[in-house]
Image (tube, grey):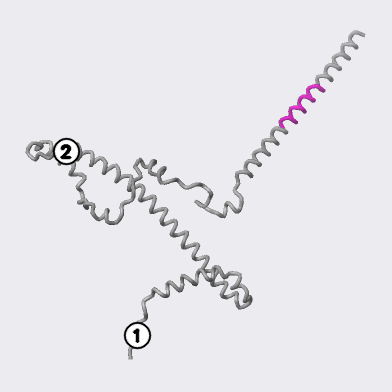
Amino acid sequence: MATSKTKTAAKSANKSANKSASKSASKSASKSASKSANKSANKSANKSANKPSPAAAKKGNGAGNAKPIGTKELAGLLGVGLTKRLDTAAVRRLRKPLPGYVNLLDDVATLLEEDSALLNLRDVTPDQLLQLQERQKYLSAREGIAETVYRSIYEQRLQVDDDAMGKLLKISRRIDSAAEDDPDVRIRWKSLIDFLAKFRRQAGSTAEPAAPKEG
């Protein structure tokens, strides 16, 4: 009788343990699946949010709303001051540098120090020459960097101008051909037609006159 009760108790205990284990496993699996689903949904949402809209994508490189860097900020990055621009006359009055003079400055500074008493130049010192040499090299290096960046920006802008003007002229030619089927098309596109015609007239007025025919 005791053995029967023991078997019944053991069977009941096993059943309870199995049920509890099954419930725990199911709960764990459900929690894991939910977590995985949430992670996947968040990843998809973030990817969708970071993906640019078609309108933004059409703008292309450098056509966003980013504020361009200011002149003072750029000068600061290069480590130079931003001075007032010289006019043409002031630039022409400046002495033209001889090629290779910079490499001569340190030798001249040494000689000047040796013959300082003989030459007696109070307003020209060896230290001044060495400082000018250092400053010239400093500015020359940054001028090269700025010139490279400027040239790249300049040529990129020229290419954009070429592309944009090519598209405007292509539209203009298509308007001319479409006017045969729809005379009102020139009215709808009047602003573009007048704009291009104005510059065509200006170009024609500055053209050299044709040479008279002989005979």
- Quarter-wise, where is residue 204 in the image? bottom left
Q: Is residue 34 left or right of residue 167?
A: right
The verdict on residue 215 being magenta is no
Could you say which quadrant of the image residue 77 lies in?
top left
Q: List the single residue furthest toward the bottom.
A: 215
- Residue type indicated by callout 1: Pro
Left or right, 52 with respect to 13, comes to: left
Predominant SS of the magenta segment: helix
Is 29 in the magenta?
Answer: yes
Rendered-image quadrant of the C terminus: bottom left
Furthest-left residue in this view: 118
Residue 54 horizontal/vertical position (percent): 61, 53
Element type where label 1 sits in the image: loop
| Secondary-structure class at tag 2 | loop
Q: Which corner quadrant holds the N terminus?
A: top right
Instruction: Examine the image and state in which quarter residue 207 appears.
Output: bottom left
First in sequence, mark 1 or 2: give its number: 2
Q: Name the residue at 36% across, 48% down.
A: 146
Q: Position of residue 171 (x, y in %)?
A: 55, 68
Q: Position of residue 125 (x, y in %)?
A: 16, 38
Q: Residue at x 66, y 38 (%)?
A: 42
Question: What residue is drawn where x is 63% and y is 41%?
Answer: 46
Residue depicted at x 47% and y 47%: 68
Magenta-tinted stretch: 18-32
The kind of residue tagged 2 is Thr
Q: Which residue is mark 2?
A: 125
